[in-house]
Amino acid sequence: MAKDAAGRACLTAHGDGSLLLLAVQPGARRTGADGLHDGALRLKLVAPPVEGKANQALVAWLAGELGCARRAVRVARGTTSRRKAVEIDLPPAEVERWLDRVLGATA
C-alpha cells in the first residue's frame, strides 16, 4: 500500500474522510494502541472476539479517542478478522494528529 503524504501507510484519504488500517488483538488486558505492525496500527482491545463485541468496542474506543460520534466510525472490511479497515468521517490530517499523539505515547 502506498504511503500518504505524511508517510503513514496505515492511514489514507477515503473520500472526504479517512481509512485506517488496524491489526486488532482482542481479549487483551487493556485497550490501547500498541505501535505499528506490518502497515497497520496495532490495537489491543479488552473485549473478546465474540458476537461482534470486539468490533463494537473498537468503534466506541476510536470514536472516544478521536472525539467524534460512533456513527462516524465504521468497520469497512475485516469484521471477522484481526486485520481491519475502518472508515472515519474525519479529515486525514485530523486522524494523523491523533496518530502522532498515540504513537508518540507508545514509543
Image (cartoon, rainbow, N blue to C red):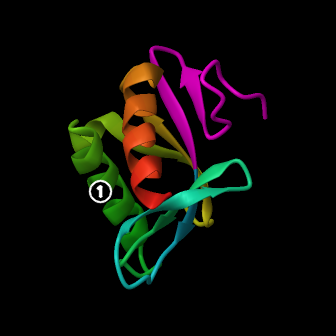
Callout 1: helix, strand or loop? helix
Residue 56's place in the image compared with 11, above or below, is below
Q: Is residue 56 left or right of residue 24?
A: left
The residue located at (37%, 38%) in the rendering is 98
- Residue 100: quadrant of the picture: top left
Q: Nearer the viewer, residue 104 or 92?
A: 104
Q: Where residue 56 sits: x, y (%)?
A: 34, 62
Q: Where residue 71 sits: x, y (%)?
A: 27, 39
Q: Is residue 13 left or right of residue 58?
A: right
Q: Where residue 39 sits: x, y (%)?
A: 71, 47
The residue located at (43%, 21%) in the rendering is 93
Report the magenta residues as a range. Answer: 1-21
The residue located at (42%, 62%) in the rendering is 55
The residue located at (41%, 82%) in the rendering is 48
For disc 1, the neighbor class at 10 Å (few under 14, some 14 to 19, many from 20) is some
Question: Label 1 is placed on what type of residue?
Answer: Trp
Residue 105's place in the image compared with 24, above or below, is above
Q: Nearer the viewer, residue 53 or 26?
A: 26
Q: Which residue is mark 1?
A: 61
Q: Quadrant where the N terminus lies?
A: top right
Magenta-colored stretch includes residue 10 = yes
Q: Nearer the viewer, residue 22 or 104?
A: 104
Residue 107's place in the image compared with 21, above or below, is below
Q: Where residue 95 sits: x, y (%)?
A: 41, 32
Magenta-colored stretch includes residue 45 = no
Residue 11's place in the image compared with 78, above or below, is above
- Residue 91: quadrant of the picture: top left
Residue that extends furthest to the top in the rendered view of this protein: 16
